Amino acid sequence: MIDFLIIGGGIAGLSTGARLSQHGKVTVLEAEEALGYHASGRSAALFEESYGPPSVVALNRASASFMHTENGGYLTPRGLMLVGGKDQGEAFEQDVADLNMQVITTDDAQTRVPILNLETLGFAAISNGAFDIDTDRLLQDFARVIRSNGGEVLTKAKVTAIRKARHWIIEAGGTYEADTLINAAGAWVDEVAAMAGIAPIGIIPKRRSMARLPAPGGHDVKDWPMMLGVGEAWYAKPDAGKLLVSPSEADPVPPHDAYADDMVLAEGLARYEEMVTEPVTRVETNWAGLRSFAPDGTLVLGPEPADPSFIWVAGQGGYGFQTSPAASQLVADRVIGAAPDLDAETIAALSPERLRR
């Protein structure tokens, strides 16, 4: 008998499994051949405490110590620069306030990122509190904790049927029996819920595309901050000597193995090009990921009111990695009946109960 069976081997499932593995036998079932194959493997991999709605910011802050110090830390300084056109002053000011950034001159911005175009750049701001996340090491370390505590992490284990008798019975190339079922299936969480006889919560998968470009103009980009267009109209982030550029779209799509939309990608690259002096002459590769959102845009963490043995870990919406230490601890606390460290308002804002009223 398994104490905690987790469907989904992305950051949500693995972090939750690591926390629960201290309290019982954990088995994680991942449908794909590799862990973190979908959204987790296609993340922007940035930690910024002020990014997200209030409940997400609370999780970010509660995750910061873990991210900075656990296992030597998972964060490397990156910085985040907000850039806006000359006609975007009002929207720029709102973003600066929302992200708690410091306004800098356009000359200072160009010193930090030499390809910025002073003919089109009207405003800039910086946050030094943004960090790259070593996402692969974080995933693997959570999986290692599960295994070291006697649990299993299985790939190529697609769930095909779920039923409830005295306990949960899950078919996934074999039969598994568990007292508690944790649904961390990303874009597929509502499909898993339906198999289990649980009403869906209305998760909406949204596509986000990405292009990898050669270093613009042959510059060394490793110390550049991540750049964010006003209104999150695009972003660009250094990665292994290249530059990742995204149109930052959030187009609703069915759950699937996502791929970039060529037209959306082209439009996003054009918005990026408006702010820089180096045109995009070649895209080395492109891809897309699905970020999954609850109807109110924040995470869904905790027991299903209709059956408390069914646990939601859903709606990460692009915040999954940066919130994972605190989000997984909250889920574990709620499952085992411990008192969470988070305040009651934040817990309520994240609880599945809010979507069942």
Image (cartoon, rainbow, N blue to C red):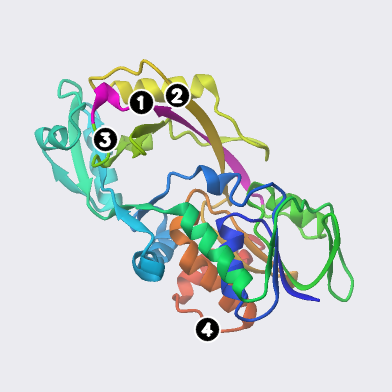
Q: Which residue shows up at 33% across the image and 26% down it?
A: 272
Query: Between marks 4 and 3, how big is the CA–CA gap?
Result: 45 Å
N-terminal of the pair, mark 1 or mark 3, is: 1
N-terminal of the pair, mark 2 or mark 4, is: 2
Circle 4 residues within 10 Å: few <14, some 14–19, many ≥20: few
Circle 3 residues within 10 Å: few <14, some 14–19, many ≥20: some
Q: Which residue is mark 4?
A: 339
Q: Which residue is mark 2?
A: 284
The correct choice, above or below, for 37 with respect to 197 in the image is: above
Q: Is residue 212 magenta?
A: yes
Q: Which residue is mark 1?
A: 214
Find out whether the residues at labels 2 and 1 contact each other: C-beta distance under 8 Å: yes
> What span is in magenta?
202-219
N-terminal of the pair, mark 4 or mark 1, is: 1
Given the image, on which type of amino acid does mark 1 rest?
Pro
N-terminal of the pair, mark 2 or mark 3, is: 3
Which secondary structure, mark 4? Answer: loop
Q: Is residue 60 magenta?
A: no
